[in-house]
Image: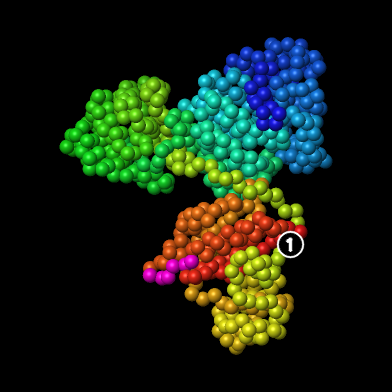
């Protein structure tokens, strides 16, 4: 039985052992409050009871091996307790203590070594943590959670796994109407981790969507495989990945001892896996709610309903930051809608239906029905309800019911959206729930959720990324040797040769002008004055040789490429543990200025490469901008594929070609930076 299956016993226990005093007491109370009906077995050497529950003196005194144990003793005692549990055949343990790998070496104690001792003590028994807050299974009334939380018994809903205990706690306290089935925190992921939790969620038919708050993925290949399995079950994943900025990565690494990956690498991984990304906890909650109530969107075409021109304009403006589309109504559709209105209302999308019918549920439902009876993928009703108990909200409830009636009549998807997240009442939420409508809270968050759901509807998981390990030691390959290796592997390079500085003129004569001269032995040749391009004759070449830095003894003499249409960056590097990161973008002097890049994870197809190139702002240059000749895109795609195969098939850590010079009939690696593993 694999570790993933054993974690199912950990997350669905019928017996729970508890170690510690204060945290154990709180866990007992939370389990009782949530309705846990199994055995609660506190273990304490001197106390008779904890939270009114009889204590056992030792693991050996328990009725049988517990399905899971909550271990809340100091880090050194934790190792001993885990060893006892593993020997007894326990189903798993939640290790609450910190001071392991996330803390580094402090006061002479090596946290990483201590964590390794913990893993060895556990053996085959799975661990959540250490440095872990615990978990809540609201479906089965389990709360190994030593604190307050906002979960309540649920028949089904979203499952969230979080590397941060406090963020997990915050998410349980949401007041946005998310049915939260699981909240599992994994801490340092010393043993069981995100992938193990996904395995359990996917196997539980009560789970309707999955959310991630992650800093790092430990096993991207397995993660990709699980994302594909989830999608086959129509169960989709939304991720909030933190630690993407330089400061965030530093904090994440110090907090969980898991290296936080770069923004581009994780974005490429999640895209490859068909996992939608959001930017905030509120967006994560709203996206999960939308998936719970109806699944992914069938497309990105929306209609917006509001009784205010200002709201309609706001919707149109904010949607420009997304891929969502508010297309005009067809003439026939417009006529059907107009027939339900007065002549003073102009029909458009977003649609301001005015207040003439406000409070008239039948008239509103009639208009909404005609609006919803169209080709859009969802219809939104902007509805901010007076939230105070002393305020009347009957008319707002009626509007939500009218949308529900229209959705039922047309069998189309309706969504209630509050522009301000607090302007939703229990009555409106109940009316929406009765009509099987979701209520999204906050216009920005609602649009982000809809954008994510539409993206998920259009993007299924792809092939698994190639596995990668970080190199231990590396060495720089100079450009001349790098180009020899590139040429041997099918990459076009300029005609050229390595030579001593004294032999530059003779070498250039054999190659032919114009010449590009490069001094070898420097990583950043341009900044050091070691690159001279387009030298037209021997006099210009001689002058360029004299300008080279004195420490240069060898040169690369190449024929200058002419008729260049565009300069493109192509790079492949190991970005462990995520994968081989392929980056395409604006090259040459524009790389840092434009920051116009697209990233993929290898292996990739020619179609993937072409789509990524088409997403670049620089792409019009390749197609013939303002009457200029088009570049050889097929040659650029083939060059990229060859570079990827070279990187994956050798002991290389990184290849960067910047620029690739694209001409009307070729793509040439003009400059090459290559790092190999020693």
Q: How many marks?
A: 1
Query: 676 or 256, which lies in front?
Result: 676
Residue 670 pos. (x, y %): 58, 70
Tell me if residue 379 is in the magenta stretch. Answer: no
Instruction: Examine the rendered structure and indicate whether residue 111 appears above or below residue 43.
Output: below
- The residue at 41%/70% (across/down) is 628
- The residue at 69%/73% (across/down) is 520
Which element type, helix, strand or loop, lies under badge 1? strand
Kindly indicate the quadrant of the structure image that contains residue 212: top right
Tell me if residue 631 is in the magenta stretch. Answer: yes
Residue 117 pos. (x, y %): 80, 35
Which of the colour schemes (rainbow, by chain, secondary structure, one colour) is used?
rainbow
Residue 26 pos. (x, y %): 66, 20
* Quarter of the rendering occupied by the C terminus: bottom right
Highlighted range, magenta: 627-632
User: Which residue in the rendered view is the most extreme toward the bottom?
Assistant: 539
On the image, numbered disc 1 is attached to which residue?
475
Residue 417 pos. (x, y %): 38, 33
């Amino acid at each position: 039985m694999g570790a993933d299956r054993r974690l199912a016993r950990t997350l669905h226990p019928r017996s729970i052992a508890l170690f510690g005093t204060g945290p154990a007491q709180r866990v007992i109370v939370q389990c009782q409050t949530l309705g846990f009906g199994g055995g609660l077995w506190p273990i304490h050497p001197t106390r008779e009871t904890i939270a009114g529950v009889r204590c056992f003196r030792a693991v050996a005194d328990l009725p049988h091996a517990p399905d899971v144990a909550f271990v809340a003793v100091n880090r050194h005692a934790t190792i001993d307790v885990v060893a006892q549990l593993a020997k007894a055949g326990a189903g798993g343990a939640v290790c609450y203590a910190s001071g392991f790998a996330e803390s580094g070496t402090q006061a002479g104690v090596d946290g990483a070594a201590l964590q390794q001792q913990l893993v060895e003590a556990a053996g085959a028994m799975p661990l959540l943590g250490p440095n872990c807050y615990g978990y809540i299974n609201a479906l089965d009334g389990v709360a190994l959670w030593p604190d307050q939380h906002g979960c309540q018994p649920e028949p089904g809903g979203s499952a969230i796994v979080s590397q941060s205990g406090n963020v997990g706690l915050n998410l349980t306290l949401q007041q946005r109407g998310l049915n939260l089935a699981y909240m599992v925190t994994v801490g340092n992921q010393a043993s069981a981790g995100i992938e193990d939790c996904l395995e359990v969620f996917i196997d539980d038919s009560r789970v309707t969507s999955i959310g991630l708050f992650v800093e790092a993925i430990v096993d991207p290949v397995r993660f990709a495989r699980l994302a594909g399995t989830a999608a086959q079950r129509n169960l989709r994943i939304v991720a909030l990945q933190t630690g993407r900025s330089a400061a965030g990565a530093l904090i994440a690494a110090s907090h969980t001892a898991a290296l936080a990956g770069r923004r581009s690498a994780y974005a490429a991984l999640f895209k490859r896996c068909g996992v939608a990304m959001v930017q905030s906890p509120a967006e994560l909650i709203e996206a999960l709610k939308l998936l719970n109530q109806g699944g992914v969107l069938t497309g990105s075409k929306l209609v917006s309903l509001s009784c205010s021109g200002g709201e309609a304009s706001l919707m149109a403006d904010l949607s420009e930051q997304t891929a969502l589309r508010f297309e005009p109504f067809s003439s026939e559709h417009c006529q059907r809608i107009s027939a339900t209105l007065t002549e003073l209302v102009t029909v458009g999308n977003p649609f301001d239906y005015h207040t003439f019918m406000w409070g008239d549920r039948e008239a509103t439902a009639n208009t909404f029905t005609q609006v919803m009876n169209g080709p859009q993928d969802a219809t939104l009703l902007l509805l901010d309800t007076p939230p105070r108990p002393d305020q009347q909200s009957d008319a707002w409830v009626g509007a939500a019911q009218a949308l529900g009636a229209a959705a039922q009549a047309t069998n189309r998807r309706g969504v209630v959206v509050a522009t301000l997240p607090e302007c939703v009442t229990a009555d409106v939420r109940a009316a929406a729930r009765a009509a099987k409508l979701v209520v999204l809270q906050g216009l920005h968050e609602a649009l982000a959720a809809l954008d994510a759901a539409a993206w998920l509807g259009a993007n299924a998981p792809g092939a698994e990324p190639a596995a990668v390990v970080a190199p231990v030691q590396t060495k720089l390959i100079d450009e001349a040797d790098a180009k020899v290796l590139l040429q041997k592997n099918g990459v076009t390079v300029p005609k050229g040769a390595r030579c001593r500085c004294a032999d530059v003129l003779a070498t250039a004569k054999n190659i032919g002008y114009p010449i590009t001269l490069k001094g070898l032995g420097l990583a950043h040749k341009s900044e050091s004055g070691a690159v001279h391009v387009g030298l037209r004759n021997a006099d210009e070449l001689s002058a360029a040789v004299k300008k080279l830095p004195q420490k240069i003894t060898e040169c690369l003499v190449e024929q200058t490429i002419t008729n260049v249409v565009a300069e493109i960056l192509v790079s492949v590097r190991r970005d462990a543990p995520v994968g081989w990161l392929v980056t395409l973008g604006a090259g040459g002097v524009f790389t840092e200025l434009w920051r116009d890049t697209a990233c993929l994870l290898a292996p990739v197809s020619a179609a993937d490469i072409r789509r990524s190139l088409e997403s670049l702002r620089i792409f019009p240059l390749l197609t013939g901008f303002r009457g200029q000749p088009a570049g050889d895109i097929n040659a650029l795609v083939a060059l990229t594929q060859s570079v990827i195969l070279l990187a994956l098939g050798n002991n290389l850590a990184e290849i960067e070609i910047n620029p690739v010079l694209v001409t009307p009939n070729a793509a040439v690696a003009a400059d090459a930076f290559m790092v190999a593993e020693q």
